[in-house]
Amino acid sequence: MPTLGADMSAGTLTSWKKQPGDAVKRGDIVAVVETDKADIEIEVFTSGVLEKLLVEPGTTVPVGTPLALIREEGEAPTPPAAAPAPSAAPATPAPAAPPPPAPAAAAAEHLLVSPSARHLAEELGVDLRAVTGTGPGGRIQRKDVEEAAAARGAAPAPAAPAAGEDRQARMRRAIAAAMSRSNREIPHFYVSTTVDLSRSLAWLAAENEKRPVAGRLLYGVLLLKAVALAAGEVPELNGFWEGDAPRPSEAVHVGVAVSLRGGGLVAPALHDTDRKSLDELMAEFRDLVQRARAGTLRSSELADPTITVTSLGEQGVEGVFGLIFPPQVALVGFGKVVERPWAEGGGVFVRPVIQASLAADHRVVDGHRAGLFLAAVDRRLQEPSTL
């Protein structure tokens, strides 16, 4: 069971996408896990043959629990367990076997049902054997139980907000735990600067004029790329605090804070942000936001961020000073673009500007290095054609 963020301690395996004997390669989706925030597609990080499944769907297990065995390429198959040797001593009578469960209970126990759907069925008195699942592999989901309850009039189906409140409450608890840990364990300090965006926005307008509407860029991808390149210049801020020491990351995977419908947020990663073109980042950003709000993220996207960016500009906020997502060591915030007087070359002009902030872990860097990081972000945004 992978760690899908600092706020996760356990997950519920909901379905297997591969079966014993199937060949798998790095990046394949092998299972789906339900967390407090979403249903996450679990990727495999080695190639070989899926030899054995160790956890049944519907089981909740702690992070770090083995889910399956994979025989890597070139490895010999695991030998079957040897039968126990016969004993010379007279066998003692075996204890009486417990009575088998009632047919109805046994049938319901072995159905493929999400934990939240099973709980809802108990509340509404719905017999799961009579419910047709519409999820992957015939898995019974909450909406299937609600429809079954409404069809037979057993009880009114919960309104959509009530169904959302269950996961919403769990998400808020998970976020609270992670942010409490962040505030308790990480010695935060903050620096900020105001960035003149006139060059970036002028370049972006000219660039978008050449493109069809569907292929146009948002200024947000310029911010993400500038942060990624700045992280390469000040690598201490791109990585993790593990145990009692920092661990910088060679790869730059920028986490993007995405607000979810109904509240809450996730911060999945755009992998190798510093190496991708603006077009690639734009396409991946749109896809990431869409899947985050649909609850279909991949495990690597939640486990891999090395530095996170959050923006509240769309909400009219001019500055944001957030808490770092542990075990990361930095978080970059952007406010909205506003017009302000700007003094330059002896004159005063009206320029579009944005406030950029950095929350940094004082165990890893000091104010000097933090200042260099924001200066690098500013410099990159003054040269948009090089992003």
Image (spheres, rainbow, N blue to C red):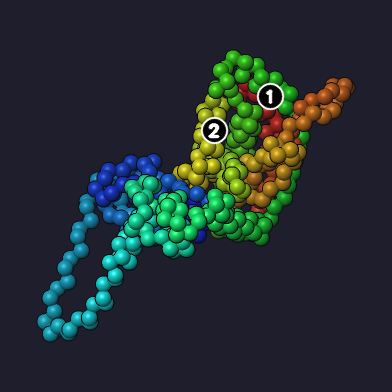
Q: Position of residue 14 (x, y in %)?
A: 39, 53
Q: Nearer the viewer, residue 200 or 293?
A: 293
Q: How many marks?
A: 2
Residue at image point 65% right, 21% down: 204
Secondary structure beneath label 2? helix
Q: Which mark is residue 73?
A: none
The quadrant in which the N terminus is found is bottom left
Residue at image point 60% right, 47% down: 262
Q: Is residue 147 left or right of residue 48?
A: right
| Sequence-first tag of 2 and 1 | 1
Packing grade of label 2 (10 A; few <14, some 14-19, many >=20) is few
Packing grade of label 1 (10 A; few <14, some 14-19, many >=20) is some
Q: Is residue 333 left or right of residue 215?
A: right
Q: Farthest residue in the front direction?
A: 153
* Residue 287 visible to the viewer: yes
| Amino acid type indicated by mark 1 | Ser
Q: Is residue 123 left or right of residue 313?
A: left
The CA distance from mark 2 to mark 1 is: 20 Å
Q: Which mark is residue 200?
A: 1
Q: Position of residue 306 (x, y in %)?
A: 56, 44
Please say if 240 is above or below 103. Answer: above
Q: Nearer the viewer, residue 46 or 5?
A: 5
Cβ atoms under marks 2 and 1 closer than 8 Å? no
Q: Which residue is mark 2?
A: 286
* Residue 368 visible to the viewer: no
Q: Position of residue 203 (x, y in %)?
A: 66, 19
Q: Nearer the viewer, residue 270 or 274?
A: 270
The quadrant in which the C terminus is found is top right
- Between tags 2 and 1, which lies in front? 2
Residue at image point 68% right, 24% down: 200
Q: Nearer the viewer, residue 134 or 172?
A: 134
